[in-house]
Image (cartoon, coloured by chain):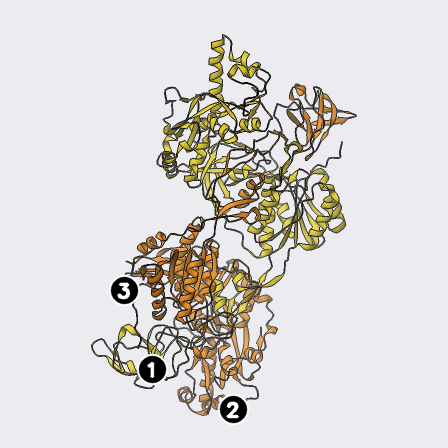
Chain colours: A yellow, B orange
């Protein structure tokens, strides 16, 4: 039984912020070609090294003149000047403007000697070797004198300036082809954990292997914050290897991040390296998710140990580490958009820890609703099912439904989804969404979908089979009516063929529902699924035919209580040989090459929130479903 | 006399937008490694190819149990289970949980056969080969079942999804190591104009050469909009070469941009290529700046011809071209921050053309003031002296001072400057600004500085010499008092030594002001400069001593009316041999190795807007000036 470390005396969020801010990250400066300078931050003041323009420059096409020669010229009483020649942009003038003469000049050309103004071509007429000028000009008119834009010696850009196309334009005008910029801090990323496998490699689920999420997420976050991510080979739980990687990263980087390093055994290695090379300044923070953060130094590098769970790791990264990287890179805090919203559903928190509650957003037309998204920190879908976080103070234990909250969007680029759908997981619906802009589809089953629609959260619910929800909405497939107190509108409906899926060749000889009670391992769907409701209804009928009850029947089915999460999951369990027969769709059987025993067709219905029928996303969904070709999915029919 | 093309029948802005939007830009798709996918846009729906997690997973450190074995367990009356072994993350369980037993389990490990829940370690005590469980658990507690995060077959991400660290995390969890994304549209950039020289190359100002600004600016703009810029060799005005580059770019790119291509002669070449390869759809747009835009096709590529002036080119690019590139790249319109501001000073526009007026912003504490920045489209400093634009409708000819305006910031990253200083150009002030965050310094001379301070625009004015401004502010160096009706606060002051600058060795033997009337070419500063006021005051004294007038004296000085733009400009003119003697600072003489004839010390004073003395930028400036080491500049004294 191993020694388990615990995180006691958690630091308050502000103390943790201060500890991280104290980490000294100075990546230094480097020169980069102007072509690569976009987004970088100037390390030094740049003064103009030359005048721009470097000469008195015509700012119009026309004629260079002596202004005094044009005095009194009008439309009706023009002045005539002798044509003395021409000068074009990029040419050195070969003629001067003597009194009574003019020189044709192009925009950008050098003003010839003698001239002090330009008459626009529109105010002139050419006549043999003479030019009629129909407008008087003042000295300097249509001329940009040397240095008028910026003069040599003037301050052009200061240190800390972020280089956008506009600053790059000014630098180009000054002839600068390389600029001193702050280096992007080098951020080493070391991931630990024997169970982690790099994406793309084969996965052994029996050993509990999962793909390494944090290395990719944190590397992308580092780049987004203006750092240069440097990924180190995955150390597994080979602690010598982990120690080697940490030491190497500390030598090569300005900041070292490890993830998963807060597990009991990995933390021992981290402690050992810290004791040897640096110091530990913080151990645990009163934040949820993210408690087991470590902060310290490793040699000259700063060090932050991130939790292993992706949502926790990214929360700690966004809250504490990204600001440190941005500051070192010289980048401003992003203008993180905050959205005022109304909390849909109550939220309870543990007191004493600041909580970052991930929330999704939905527009009702009158307000923005925020709903908690919390499948647990271990869930990666929490990353994308949320649009931002609500920071709940450590002293707040309860937020009531309907409370106003401020949602910090994950980035200013976040757009509230154009459509929120909750309900049955259905492949036709999932595909039709491809034609809808920025949709969100929470496939939690028909019952939760209809229940949440009744509560006023989603724009649409997807309901399959004879789903009946306790309370105010009935969705009854038999008469195609939506009962209860809500006037949910049916946006679209179709049918899908369902039944039992068995390996090709049906080795166990499954022919009807009665065969499920034999020596076969069945795999079912959960009670939230409309498919499950169709299955149970069929079992009722079958039991009645046999003069028995559904309960007696299901007691005899090995695996009736063995449920899986999505429409294709039973098919996959059968295909992988883990189970012998599963509940599912003909479409899944066809897709995986399984045999299919049809038991019926069930309706899938998309029900719109009656108050959001004008919402563009709802209309776009209606159009997408109208246009969807159901023939592309076996067993589907409109 | 060349044929000059004119742009008549200008398209209205909305028609031009529609014409550009009709250009068909479809760069197609490509697969990129997940590590390079940040910021890219998914080209296809990604469905989960596996269950996440792929097994029933412990979500806490503790003991895997059969939930029914824990029924009734409490703090005071624990249940004791036999310790049957351990399973760690990344291991395949080698033991099962039989009734009455438990297995030690780490977060992330595979739940052993027989177990259906996990008891948190905090609710247990170890005792020999047994474990006391002090809390009952329900089936499924602290277990994430296979596929609970996302199940195989479920829709993970839709086409059009922009990949941020969060989406990258989900893709990694699904084991995806390469993703189909929209290609970044290839945008060819061809610049024309004999006068353009690439930054870094030597410049021949006598020929009217200037550095090529647009290639750098537009390339950076293309990258910012999500395109892949491809720069073609500068074609000068070699029209065969220009034609070759346009044809090559049309073959290799999705979109071809040329800049400077709207000049009369270049446009002939563009027309020839368009006639041969494509069609011209628009020629001139009623927008200022930017009128001479061209829109058409070149073979399979779209084509936009941008004006040559950098501000015009970037305005046309931002208004019409960037949205086209973003759309092709699948990126959303940026959430361009708009700021409500009050117009400071009136603005007149030409009717019939939509005007994008570049404006700078300054915070007064109570409101945001917007002031027009318009040195002309030929000025590159207009690019960085402005924070955004006010779009003035084609029907609006006049905006009064004090009108509310909406300012479209150039990007959401734009931060209103922390300090706005207007006034004398002074190298000490310019350097001290390095310690102030995000300052803006318009070195337009002491007189405009004090005048604008009186008008309430800047936070501080920089005034040098005996500057007296008509109206309500007097700045009188002799008694160090600020008179008049404004209580401008002196934030800091110092003196700088000024005089005449001559080539090393003083070849013309200049010893006093009288020598300026000899056969030498003088170079002066403009009347807005405090330095000029000091000079004129010295001339007054000198003339009085000689019993003559300043006017008689200055009539005899060759170049008294020859003025240049910045404090170091006269020194440069002398150093370059263009003039024989100049007005300037000892600091400039030392910097350039010139001889210096001192004529006096003048005060430089930083005057704060009395209503903004609490502004953080003003205080930061005060601190920076207090800390500034004036000894680093020859002739300076605090």
Query: Alpha-carbon distance for marks 1 and 2?
Result: 37 Å
Q: Nearer the viewer, mark 1 or mark 2?
A: 1
Residue B366: quadrant of the picture: bottom left
Q: Are marks 3 and 1 on the same chain?
A: no
- Which chain's residue wears label 2? B
Residue under numbered circle 2? B508
Q: As drawn, is A486 to the left or to the right of B172?
A: left
Q: Which mark is residue B231?
A: none
The residue tagged with tag 2: helix, strand or loop?
A: loop
Which picture quadrant has residue B286?
A: bottom left
Dot label at residue A85: 1
A316 vs B433: above or below: above
The 10 Å Cα crowd at callout 1, few under 14, some 14 to 19, many 20 or more, is some
- What residue does disc 3 label? B8
Classify A240 as above or below A430: below
Q: Is residue B289 left or right of residue A53?
A: left
Q: SS at mark 1? A: strand
State which quadrant residue A80 falls in. bottom left
Q: Establish whether labels 3 and 2 are both on one chain.
A: yes
Crowding near pointer 2: few (<14 within 10 Å), some, many (20+)?
A: some
Number of numbered discs overlaid on the protein picture: 3
Q: Secondary structure at mark 3?
A: loop
Q: Is residue A476 above or below residue A387?
A: above
Q: CA distance from mark 3 to mark 1?
A: 28 Å
Residue B609 is at least partly visible in this image: no
Could you tell me residue B105's position as x and y percent? 69, 30
Q: Give A506 or B162, whichever is nearer the viewer.
A: A506
């Amino acid at each position: 039984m191993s020694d388990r470390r615990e995180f006691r005396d958690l630091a308050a969020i502000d103390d943790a912020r201060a500890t991280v801010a104290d980490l000294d990250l100075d990546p230094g400066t480097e020169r980069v070609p102007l072509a690569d300078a976009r987004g970088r931050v100037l390390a030094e003041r740049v003064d103009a090294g030359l005048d721009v323009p470097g000469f008195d420059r015509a700012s119009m096409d026309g004629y260079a003149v002596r202004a005094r020669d044009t005095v009194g010229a009008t439309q009706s009483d023009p002045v005539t000047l002798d044509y003395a020649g021409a000068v074009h942009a990029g040419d050195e003038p070969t003629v001067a403007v003597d009194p009574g003469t003019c020189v044709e000049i192009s925009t950008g050309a050098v003003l010839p000697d003698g001239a002090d103004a330009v008459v626009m071509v529109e105010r002139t007429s050419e006549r043999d070797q003479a030019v009629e000028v129909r407008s008087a000009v003042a000295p300097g008119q249509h001329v940009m004198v040397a240095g008028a834009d910026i003069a040599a010696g003037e301050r052009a850009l200061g240190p800390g300036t972020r280089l956008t196309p506009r600053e790059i334009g000014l630098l180009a005008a000054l002839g600068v082809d390389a600029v001193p910029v702050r280096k992007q801090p080098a951020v080493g990323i070391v991931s630990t954990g024997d169970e982690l496998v790099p994406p793309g490699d084969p996965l052994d689920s029996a050993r509990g292997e999962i793909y390494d999420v944090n290395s990719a997420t944190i590397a992308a976050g580092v780049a987004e914050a203006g750092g240069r991510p440097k990924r180190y080979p995955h150390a597994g739980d080979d602690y010598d290897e982990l120690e080697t990687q940490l030491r190497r990263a500390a030598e090569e980087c300005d900041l070292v991040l490890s993830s998963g390093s807060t597990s009991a055994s990995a933390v021992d290695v981290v402690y050992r390296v810290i004791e040897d090379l640096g110091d530990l300044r913080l151990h645990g923070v009163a934040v949820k998710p993210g408690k087991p953060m470590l902060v310290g130094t490793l040699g000259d590098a700063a060090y932050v140990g991130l939790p292993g769970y992706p949502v926790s790791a990214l929360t700690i990264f966004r809250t504490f580490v990204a600001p440190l990287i941005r500051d070192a890179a010289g980048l401003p805090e992003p203008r993180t958009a905050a959205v005022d919203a109304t909390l849909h559903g109550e939220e309870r928190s543990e007191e004493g820890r600041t909580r970052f509650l991930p929330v999704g957003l939905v527009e009702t037309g009158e307000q923005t609703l925020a709903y908690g998204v919390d499948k647990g920190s271990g869930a990666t879908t929490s990353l994308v099912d949320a649009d931002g976080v609500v920071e709940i103070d450590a002293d707040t234990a309860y937020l009531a439904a309907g409370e106003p909250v401020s949602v910090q969007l994950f980035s200013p680029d976040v757009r509230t989804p154009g459509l929120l759908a909750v309900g049955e997981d259905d492949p036709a619906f999932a595909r039709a969404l491809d034609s809808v802009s920025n949709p969100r589809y929470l496939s939690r089953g028909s019952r939760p979908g209809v229940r949440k629609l009744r509560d006023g959260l989603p724009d649409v619910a997807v309901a399959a089979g004879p789903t009946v929800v306790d309370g105010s909405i009935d969705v009854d497939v038999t008469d195609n009516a939506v009962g209860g107190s809500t006037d949910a509108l049916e946006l679209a409906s179709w049918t899908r063929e369902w039944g039992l899926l068995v390996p090709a060749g049906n080795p166990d000889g499954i022919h009807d529902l009665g065969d499920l009670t034999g020596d076969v391992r069945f795999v079912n769907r959960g009670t939230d699924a409309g498919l499950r409701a169709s299955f149970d209804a069929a079992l009722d009928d079958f039991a009645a035919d046999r003069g028995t009850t559904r309960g007696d029947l299901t007691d005899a089915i090995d695996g009736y209580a063995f449920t899986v999460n999505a429409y294709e999951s039973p098919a996959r369990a059968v295909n992988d040989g883990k189970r012998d027969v599963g509940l599912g769709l003909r479409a899944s059987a066809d897709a995986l090459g399984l045999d299919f025993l049809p038991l019926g067709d069930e309706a899938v219905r998309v029900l719109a929130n009656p108050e959001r029928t004008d919402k563009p996303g709802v209309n776009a969904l209606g159009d997408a479903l109208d246009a969807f070709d159901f023939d592309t999915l076996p067993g589907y029919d409109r």
